[in-house]
Image (spheres, rainbow, N blue to C red):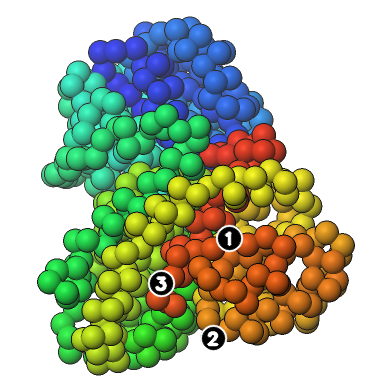
Amino acid sequence: MCGIVGYVGREQAAPILLDGLSKLEYRGYDSAGMAVYDGQHINIQKTMGRLKVLSELTHDGATMPGCVGIGHTRWATHGEPSDVNAHPHYNEDQSIAVVHNGIIENYGDLKTKLEARGYHFLSATDTEVIAHLLDYYYKKCQYNALASISKVVSRVEGSYALGIIFVDQPEYVYSVRKDSPLIVGHGQGGNLIASDVPAVLKYTRDVYFIENDEVAMLSQDNIQFYNLDGEILEKESKHIDWDIHAAEKGGYEHFMLKEIYEQPKTVRDTITPRVSNGEIVIEELGMTDEEIRALKKIHIVACGSAYHTGVTSKYVFEGMARIPVEVDLASEFRYRNPILEEGTLVIVISQSGETADSLAALRLAKSRGVKTLGIVNVVGSSIAREADKVMYTWAGPEISVATTKAYSCQLVAQYLLAMKFAHVRRQITDTELASYLVDLEKLPNQIERLLSNKEKIQKFANRYSGAENVFFIGRGIDYAISLEGSLKLKEISYIHSEAYAAGELKHGTISLIEEGTLVVAVVTQEELYAKTISNIVEVRSRGAVVFSVTNDNNQAMESNADYITYIPRTNKYFTNSLAIIPLQLFGYYVSVCRGLDVDKPRNLAKSVTVE
Ligand code: G6P
């Protein structure tokens, strides 16, 4: 989704804005632009397409001199992707420029009112109302920027992170947010705003996380925070200790491949601090054994791949700890008036910690008075801050839109929780816990082993990169794995692909199977082998080509699949962590083979900050 940056300092702003925007590319966008104050005017350059088009247009920023500016990558919501809809947007006399991440829900009403007052709109965006509304209130508030920003914020409904510059206040960049991410970087000789930390890391590691309805006023040497009543706020900066290189490709062709290969380490980093002397210690959970025993129900709420980890966890929590689990897509949960009774724990899973629906679901759960736990990757993000408790996944920055390493870390974080709950609730013995731990701690090396064997998958991907339809099937946890395998393929290869519970095929989808259709069958659950194989037989007899992901030495598969990839043996609850590896590689190599933009697939965003 849209990314914003802003800079005020001693250096030329445009190259810094371009660099910052390049670190936000992962969020997904279709156009980009910058506004820079040149000593007299605010100049805007904006264009459809990738950042390199904007770089070319401005000769890497050289044609936009000035030390104060704001920049934007736009992921279209209101109005098609186009030059005119790209941000920044001006007010009527071009004395104010605005960039915006979020959605102004009442923009229609505001636009009608502004038009009645004589304002003219050039674009089809919701953002342009902010530029004109600011103009209106700036004049009404005797050119007091803070007062006019507060007025605007009191009139708009929806979500926003705004970057604003005024021609008659050329030494300042202003910013305010509600429900869209925003950070402020405290640099040497210059300060920055951005949607995410990587955009400022080249210039500073000292960062402020901005809360809803806080206004930041940045000048070259100073940063001041205000509430909407204009009162000064004291905020503490956080020192970011991860490295900029963590957000760079490091010799890999794509971020996605790099992130796939980082999984042994990140999975280990997520497990290790929580295992001590044969015990699982999750201090951040902040629950006593009595509270764990008193749990009556768990709701897992998330979007996209994070939701798929929740589907897996339902089998794990219910199977291991015997706690009833409901798994919901956050966009459904928030509008379905869920029954949340005492003794319920709501777990919200999110890589970014900023997904609008997941955040809204968390707030709903909190408003109903139940305990909430965030499983989050981005430290200090909104979900991490707002959940009662947060358990971090230690995946490090994930740049590729298609998640891999964060997904794997979310899985093991949930295994740890399930094992802890199962043990405390005496559903598993000390011996069983010890055996689960042995399997859990083996996972990083087993993932490594799978990754060292990628050539076979690469060849298979080359062969099937022209497929038009692919079906993923499995039962139980294998169905959950299929959901993610199918998503990985479709989101980056644009091949139509569906995941189906294998037993459900004959209720409709089997009619789509014809000669040569590729079916990926995930078969890791031993007690379900025979059942899934009978579904495989059904599709093969209708001409399907079957590629199976199954456990080492599963001889039952040999005569039942056209291609097989084996995963090392592990506990039945943990097979997702291994089976997903060949499926991630499959999606990746199909996309490469089709010559697509693997890390930035069309229409998709990494951080979905609008609903
Ligand atoms: C987007 C990303 C997915 C991610 C989903 C949820 O669709 O492309 O990779 O799974 O959002 O994001 P979150 O940050 O909440 O995990």
Considering only order in the chain, which callout, 2 or 3, is on the residue closer to the N terminus?
2
Task: State yes or no: discs 3 and 2 in contact (Cβ < 8 Å).
Answer: no
Image height of 527 relative to 565, above or below: below
| Amino acid type indicated by mark 2 | Glu
Camera sees residue 242: yes
Task: Identify the residue position indicated by label 2 in the image.
Answer: 527
Q: Secondary structure at mark 1?
A: strand
Label 1 packing within 10 angstroms: few (<14), some (14-19), many (20+): some
- Badge 2 marks a residue whose secondary structure is helix
Residue 434, picture quadrant? bottom left
Q: How many neighbours does mark 2 have within 10 angstroms: few (below 14), some (14-19), or many (20 or more)?
A: few
Residue drawn at x 42%, y 29% as measured from the top left: 251
Rendered position, 482 above or below 263: below
Residue 172 marker: none
Disc ID at residue 570: 3
Give coordinates of residue 426: x percent, y percent.
Answer: 25, 92
Residue 372 is situated, as x and y percent measured from the top left of the image, at 31, 73
Residue plotted at (69% across, 38% down): 594
- How far separated are the C-alphas under marks 3 and 2? 14 Å
- Tag shown at residue 565: 1
Q: Residue sitting at 33 percent across and 24 percent down?
A: 7
User: In the rendered structure, which disc, 1 or 2, sits on the residue that comes first in sequence?
Assistant: 2
Is ligand 1 closer than 8 angstroms to the Cβ of mark 2?
no
Q: What is the distance, in whole Å, between disc 3 and disc 1 at their CAs?
A: 15 Å
Q: What amino acid is labelled 3 in the image? A: Thr
Q: Nearer the viewer, residue 159 or 388?
A: 388
